[in-house]
Amino acid sequence: MQSMEEMIRAAQAAAETIQKQMGEADTKLEAMEVEGAAGGGLVKITCSAKGRVIRVAIDDSLIQPSEKQMLEDLVAAAFNDARTKAEQVAGREMERIQQGMGLPAGFNLPGMT
């Protein structure tokens, strides 16, 4: 039977391991890229899986003053598409990590959402 002190040390070691794995996952998600598109690919936004916008690509055919409102709408739609994909990638990655730690799917670690 373990003493209380041994149990506390084991819990601290487990917490440190989880914190390290979550930090590694965070770094990995920042390096992963997803692309959102709108207007049949005329506007594309690339984001990290953490949702940081990396680049915006706009087809030359849309660069016309008369198309300004449509272009703005397409940029917003492409961003939203990329953001949704980033959230999906992040969710799958976090689920994979949690399963690797033996945690049930959907388990939320405080501060790791």
Image (spheres, helix red, strand yellow):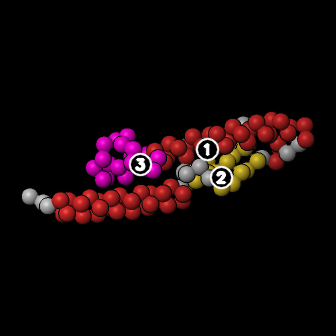
Q: Residues within 10 Å of mark 3 (few under 14, many from 20)?
A: few
Count up the numbered dots: 3
Left or right of residue 81: residue 8:
left
Residue type of the residue flagged with mark 1 = Ala
Q: Nearer the viewer, residue 81 or 106?
A: 106
Residue type of the residue flagged with mark 2 = Val
Residue type of the residue flagged with mark 3 = Pro
Q: Position of residue 24 (x, y in %)?
A: 44, 61
Q: Position of residue 28 (x, y in %)?
A: 48, 59
Q: Residue at x 59, y 49 (%)?
A: 51
Residue at label 2? 53
> Can residue 73 be found in the magenta stretch?
no
Quote the CA–CA distance across marks 1 and 2: 9 Å
Q: Is residue 70 above or below residue 59?
A: above
Q: Is residue 82 above or below residue 101?
A: above
Quote the CA–CA distance across marks 3 and 1: 26 Å
Residue at label 1? 82
- The magenta-colored residue range is 92-113
Q: Position of residue 68 (x, y in %)?
A: 85, 39
Q: Position of residue 44 (x, y in %)?
A: 69, 46
